[in-house]
Image (cartoon, rainbow, N blue to C red):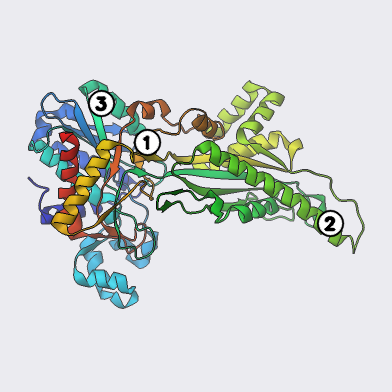
Amino acid sequence: MKWQTRDQLVKLITELVEHASITGSQGEVALGKHIYGLLKERNYFQNHPEFLELHPVDDGRSFVTALVKQGETEETIVLLSHYDVVDVKDYGDLAHLAFCPAQLTNELKARGSRLSKIVRDDLDNGEWLFGRGTMDMKAGLTVQLAMLERAMSGEFKGNILLVTVPDEEVNSAGMLCAVTVLNELKQRFGLTYKTCINSEPMFAKYPNDQNLYIYTGSIGKVLAGFYCNGIETHVGEPFSGLNANLLLSEINRLMELNDSFCEQVGDEITPPPTSLMMRDLKTEYSVQIPHTSVSMYNLLMMDRSFSELHEKLVQIAKEAALNVESFYQERVQRYNQFLSFAPLDFKVNVFTFQELLQKAISRYGDKEIERRINDLSANRGDKDDRDFSTKLAADLAGLCKEYAPMIVVFYSPPYYPAVSSKEDLLIQKTIGEVISLAKAQYQIELKQQNYFPGLCDLSFVQLTDKGQSVTQLTANMPLYGNGFQLPLREIQNLNIPVLNIGPIGRDPHKWTERLHIPYAFDMFPELLSLSIKTIFAD
């Protein structure tokens, strides 16, 4: 047993953290192979090589599946994790130590006077391990590997399937590929998936939140875009056109921190939307006004259907359109005191991407639009999903210029469906057992939450927002079928109850990211073990 004591687990997480597995880097590629290599050395997988696999993702990365079977039983728990991390630019001159937990922790102690009191206190008590990925989420992966080792020794009555993937921090490409493999493994080895347990760390709900959480689901996310096409003109004749940035400004005024988008389930509340991107699309300086622009907003969901959210976004666009029309006329009247002239007579049109696509098809035909999209896809270059989604929307708008000025509502990857097992009796029983053990044995109060707030790959093992609602999303996603696909049928076929139980950490995605060692490697393994045993005992 190599991965059971605190010292052994600290050694293992340090080894994992030292692989600089930033999403999209060669370090990420290397860590997938390293995890596979660690497991391949174990006697169990020497004797059962068919249960350990390194699966390719389309872009050269890979994910690992490792199955430990107990006799002929079908009952299986999936332990899910990701091994990629965000970049380390925020570490500044400490970036070279971001993946060296012991050295970084010591260096931070030497710089204690520059740190906040809470960080200094954590450094002084010696219970915290600093470094990129210590909290998010290599500690969870470390303890899941310990559970896999326990399964090899026969501790659990059912099968354990470890799935660890890349790319969770950006597009979840690893998990989207793993969904298909999970269905294949289910058929090949005759498995019944009872629960999918993720071990993402607890996330604070507000600054200095001291509560400890266990989650029965994960929040959903939509990345909503507004493409704006104004009317071009020279800056010397501003009333002869319409600046796309004016359209965008009004949309942002209506969207930013708009609490009507907040959703409450029990004591859990989604944050209001905030802009993730807002820019005009001019690529060079000139005295032509910006006549195309785009913005994207982060929107989180729990029980709300996508259809309801989509309708709210379309209404925002329509309200912005009317407000800009009124604003233009009001400014014309004010300028008329200096110079009398007839203003532009225009209406700002609002379309969904699907509506704009149909207008382009009706004019140019299916084959021509398909040819254009294929040509753009073949010459995509290094545009990421967000920029290429905008490019596809802009191309269609360019074919339908007679409808300008216009606002086009569209969606871009990534998309995370909201999932929850808050009404699943087995999950509730398991939660109760874990909360009781934590209180009796460790004097710790765990609070149940319906939705993990940090987004995670659990979103892709259930699909509760079905039918027309999901179709509405994919129909208005320019990239859907053009470089991005959701394995909707495979997700529906899985439909696994979910649970997230993880370690305590602080400051995810910050240069003070850190892990609480006593909880992570003394208490958490026993709580996770109890979860597994409770599920198998049902």
* Numbered tag placed on residue 293 in the rendering: none
Residue occupying the point 34% across, 73% down: 116
Question: 120 or 313, which lies in front?
Answer: 313
* Numbered tag placed on residue 332 in the rendering: 2
* Crowd band around label 3 with a 10 angstrom C-alpha radius: few (<14), some (14–19), many (20+): some
* Crowd band around label 2 with a 10 angstrom C-alpha radius: few (<14), some (14–19), many (20+): some
Report which residue position mark 3 lands on. 185
Left or right position of 170 against 46: right
Q: Secondary structure at mark 2?
A: helix
Q: Earlier in the sequence, mark 2 or mark 1?
A: 2
Above or below, comparing residue 335 to residue 170 in the picture? below
Q: CA distance from mark 3 to mark 2?
A: 66 Å
Left or right position of 93 against 515: right
Provide residue 237's location: percent of width, then percent of height: 82, 55
The answer to the question of whether label 2 and label 1 lie on touching residues, with beta carbons closer than 8 A, is: no
User: Which residue type does callout 3 highlight?
Assistant: Leu
Q: Earlier in the sequence, mark 3 or mark 1?
A: 3
Which image quarter: residue 182? top left
The answer to the question of whether label 3 and label 1 lie on touching residues, with beta carbons closer than 8 A, is: no
The answer to the question of whether label 3 and label 2 lie on touching residues, with beta carbons closer than 8 A, is: no
User: Which residue type does callout 2 highlight?
Assistant: Val
Question: 70 or 343, which lies in front?
Answer: 70
Report which residue position mark 1 lands on. 460
Question: Could you tell me which quadrant the N terminus lies in?
Answer: top left
- Mark toward the viewer: 3 or 1: 1
Q: CA distance from mark 2 to mark 1?
A: 52 Å
